[in-house]
Image (cartoon, rainbow, N blue to C red):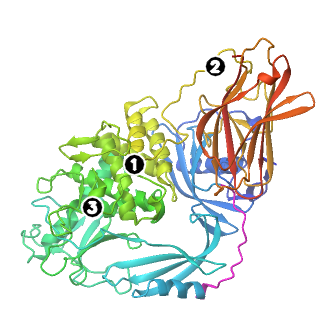
Amino acid sequence: MKRSVLVGSLSLAVSGLLISGAGSPATAADGPRPTPPKATKSEALRDAKESVAAHPRAVRASAHDTFSPESVQLDKDGTRHVHFDRSYRGLPVLGGDVILHSAPDGNFRETSLTLKAPLSLPTTARIGAQRAEAAAEKRFKGTKHETSSKLVIDTLSGKPRLAWQVVVDGIAPDQSPSHFNALVDARTGKIGQTWNDFHTADGTGHGYQVGDVTVGTTPISGGFSLKDGARGNGETRDAQNLTATNDSPPAGWGKSFTDTDNTWGDGALTDRATVAVDAHYGIQATWDYFKNIHGRNGIKNDGVGARSFVHYGQNYANAGWDDTSFSMIYGDGAAGQKPFTELDVAGHEMSHGVTSATANLNYFGDAGGLNEATSDIFGTLVEFSANNSVDAPDYLIGEKIDIRGNGTPLRWMDDPSKDGKSVKCWSSNTKNLDPHYSSGVGNHFFYLLAAGSGQSQWGNSPTCDGSTVTGIGNAAAGKIWYRALTTYMTSGTTYPGARTASIKAAIDLYGASSTQCAAVEKAWSAVAVAPTTTTCGTTTTPPTSNLLSNAGFESGATGWSATSGVITNSANGTPHSGSYYAWLNGYGTTHTDTLSQSVTVPSTATAPKLSFWLAIDTSETGSTVYDTLKAQVVSGSTTTTLATYSNTTPGGYTQRTLDLSAFKGKTVTIKFIGTEDSSLSTSFLIDDTAVATG
């Protein structure tokens, strides 16, 4: 059954879907909601819970899913975006998070998610926690550690599986705080994805100073402390060349910087406060950028400032963001080198915190590259926003660190491949790279979008398709990326998914026909991320002499016979044009959908043809046919299959044309029949159909 609603006394269930605390859902009899004033977050959350329950297909819900709200975002016009985490039979689902988008009146619009099909798998572990933890500790040998584990559903490593998520907390051999994660298959014991929740700038290097700047401080008895009351009490402290005892700097750790005359440092490294000025300036520049440009009140948007620790460790030549302790750490560098306190490094690392608080992109696969690229993008924009004369803004990452000792930066955004390891063009292999190198695709995209291709004052940027891209500037490009990150990306977003997310963001901000949206499409194609079904605007010219009525489904089911729910305007799928389309299958269970209309083919037709636009989205892999769509003609008691499509040919909308010459002079039924097996899902989307006479 496609939809069934049962309302209990304590919770709301749709086909077994549980949402704690949900109220009664709106029904068709209720009619459309009246246009209300802008909703509160609690009202938006209430309506979103109802929408999740009412649209199980849109959230890929199984009979055993529970959704818990993570965050609520309200746009200026009242449009709502509610981010939910998913559990399956009580276990967290990695990659199962979903963003539900609703109109200002609360009506459902669409969802953003990466899960392809409803879950169906056993949740009994064959491998115990102790064995899983031992395997992870062996993998992360050399890390002082405290180890913990929990059972999760891993949907990010291919076919969904039960896994132990083992976290090894401690201090890595290079003195960095570490939160190493490993996903250990709970049935085989095999280690899958691994990552570290502590993000570093990746390497040794030379620090620098930001020059004479103003920093926010707080009066105390007898002087001032390096705590910024205007920016959430963000504080910079002296680590005294120690490392945190176990892993993350705890509350109160380190020594407060104080001064009697509110003048900090003297420009020389012999004064420990000199480096503290650099770090403190990095905190305030990052805060100001997100506040002034995006209206974000701190890293978590909760008004709370971050901490920075300078002089961390003994000759520690790195810097990093630790989300667990909500803090930055900076080392003094290797012997004879300078501290690692560069402005775009500070902006980069603290932007990891913004990502963690919003899309929470994974730190592996394409999502890992997007995570690192997001920090490079915002670190660069922080640098441009601060416009510090000592560190002129550019599209180079960590250029003053001089990590290689030859005056070159850590990364180049105009052509990421200049470092010899990063990639500038996306491919199916990008997901297998270290996130610092797969980030090149996102960095290259952003540079092209902001500055354009070819030679400029900022660099010389090639394109992967030989095209020319005209930049739209940092302001528009930054707003598009921020909205895509905070409104449409989820933990497992891929580069093709980021293309979809940023196009949606550009449409929201500037319109489907805007120069900005067209530039987003062109820049993604220029880094080899091909078009998806989401575009800035599609215009379709229907064929002449179309014998089908309501051929584009814009009048709903009028003129068609179809399985309930097949003809839809659900924003979770994408029409080829207009608002309505036909969506067959996509359940991941044994299911058959049909769509048909009768038509008389004139005997005088010269070359009658059936045409339609077809998009196929599948979570199946390999070359085996599991799910099919047949285009048929029923004439009397005879059914003729004109063509068969399957999960083996996924892709965006493609026009298909089939010959109807054998049916001239006959009244026939044009029929589409989609069949799906009991495992992974395949969706067949049909739009803009036609039977033309010639």
Whichever of labels 3 and 1 marks the residue nearer the N terminus, that label is: 3
* Residue 482 located within the stretch drawn in magenta: no
Q: Is residue 618 left or right of residue 377?
A: right
Residue tagged 3: 419
Q: Position of residue 130 (x, y in %)?
A: 59, 88
Disc 1: CA contacts within 10 A as few (<14), some (14-19) or many (>=20): many
Q: Is residue 121 magenta?
A: yes
Prevailing SS of the magenta stretch:
loop
Amino acid tagged 2:
Pro
Residue at image mark 2: 543
Label 3 – label 2 distance at C-alpha = 51 Å
Residue at 30% across / 36% down in the picture? 470
Q: What is the number of the mark on residue 21?
A: none
Question: With 558 as the anchor, is 458 left or right in this view?
Answer: left
Camera-side residue of 294 and 567: 567
| Sequence-earlier tag: 3 or 2 | 3
Instruction: State if disc 2 and disc 1 touch (CB < 8 Å).
Output: no
**Residue 213 to residue 330: above or below:** above
* Residue labelled with disc 1: 482
Image quarter in which the C terminus is found = top right
Q: Which residues are magenta?
A: 117-130
Q: Label 3's element? A: helix
Question: In the figure, 74 relative to 694: above or below?
Answer: below
Give the label, 1 or 2, closer to the camera.
Answer: 2
Of circles 3 and 1, the one toward us is: 3
Q: Secondary structure at mark 2?
A: loop
Amino acid at dot 1: Tyr
Residue 339 sits in which quadrant?
A: bottom left
**Dot placed on the residue nearer the N-terminal end, 1 or 2:** 1
Residue 202: image quadrant is: bottom left
Left or right: 488 in relation to 403:
right
